[in-house]
Amino acid sequence: MKNGQGQIYHVTDNHSPSHPGVTAVITQLTRFLAGQGWSTTVLAAGKALTPVPEGVGLVEFPLRPGGRTWRYPDKLKPYLQKIKKASGNIFHLHGVWGAPQWLAARAAVHQKVPALLTAHDMLSPWHWQDGRLRRLKKLVYWRALAYPAFRNLTVIHAITPKERDDLARLFPGQRPEVIPNAVDLEEAENLLSDSESGSAPPSGKYLLFLGRLHPQKGVDILLNAFARSLKGRDFRLVLVGPDSTSAYTAKLKSVINLSGLEKQVTFLGPVFGPQKWRLYRDAWALCSPSQTEVVGLVNLEAAAAGAPVITTHETGLFDWEEGGGILVHPQVEPLQAALEQVFSWSDRERQDRGRKLRQLVERRYSWKAVGPLWLELYAKILGR
């Protein structure tokens, strides 16, 4: 795999900010691999609006007219057919519902190229309950196309033990390999340093949410819990991230109006780079009450910035409380209790929890800890 022998091909249906979680994971993983001298290339359906790291290859495949829903890429199939097993090639598929992953899975089996699949939480039980019609469509697609293509891949990768158990039920006979997401602490330090010259964060004490304004992220749960727990305390809630649908955003604003929180809640929209990291660092705490997630890079990033983090058991962060973080289920009452505890912290306790969480990330969720696991898994796939 080193010294020009072979490639790891990362296959994604959307390498752009509109696909933030998967794109961030691919960016960090490929940066790590390039830094270790491993040859790696991103194969992206459509225009890759997020640049790849230095030393990483990129091949973009225009979407076929009429194929945008499935993200069907023109010319990907013949490109994949030229890649052979020899010389240590590996296909790494990211996601399960797009045409690029399906094409790559079929090519891997046909050409006997070793391949692994990272589902990125797309097969969690929560996603199968997204409305009766969508659930039926997913079931038909899974049984007719996705599972027959994926079941013979070399490795199924899970990000958490919880996701491993979910995937094991969908892939009988497979034992998924667990490697968690990671955060680049060196990059975090650089961005925190650069944030000093950026615009100032909101004044006063604030609770931070960062992510898509989407039902999966539990933003409505957060607003209701915040309203109940505030009880006259001088805290604000800052919501950072893009809208998902106009209907859901309207629902959030209705909750704010009915709760009388117009002056306590601020929508900032998407924020990137040093400004984002300054928001992390200066927040009283980050709250990410996701209905389903696999670790969640936002949790790792906030902890890397020294902020305490409240998130959910559903993220699979089984060890989070060891580092002073708080885990709840994505429901209003337990989140309310957690927020009341958070709002009662002294400055000293907030700082202590943030420091302990940063230390946990250094031990288990940094690239120093996680990177060698990826190198070992790729070598195992190649039989080395």
Image (spheres, helix red, strand yellow):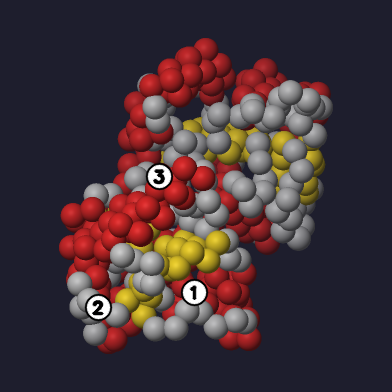
Real-space CA distance between mark 3 and mark 2, rounded to the nearest whole angstrom = 27 Å
Check whether the beta carbons of the residues at disc 3 and disc 2 lie within 8 A of each other. no
In primary-sequence order, the first of circles 3 and 1 is: 3
Name the spot of residue 282 as percent of width and height, x first. 44, 80
Element type at marker 3?
helix
Check whether the beta carbons of the residues at disc 3 and disc 1 lie within 8 A of each other. no
In primary-sequence order, the first of circles 3 and 2 is: 3
Q: Residues within 10 Å of mark 2 (few under 14, many from 20)?
A: few
Does 215 sit above or below residue 358?
above
> What residue sits 47% from the left and 43% below the top?
247
In-front residue for pair 357/156: 357
Does 262 sit above or below residue 173?
below
Residue where numbered disc 1 is placed: 279
Amino acid type at mark 2: Arg
> What residue sits 56% from the left and 29% below the top?
97
Residue where numbered disc 3 is placed: 215
Name the spot of residue 21 as percent of width and height, x first. 54, 50
Q: Residues within 10 Å of mark 1 (few under 14, many from 20)?
A: many
- Observer able to see residue 289: no
Q: How many marks?
A: 3
Real-space CA distance between mark 2 and mark 1, rounded to the nearest whole angstrom = 20 Å
In-front residue for pair 298/8: 298
- Observer able to see residue 156: yes
Check whether the beta carbons of the residues at disc 2 and disc 1 lie within 8 A of each other. no
Q: Nearer the viewer, mark 3 or mark 2?
A: 2
Q: Quadrant of residue 353?
A: bottom left
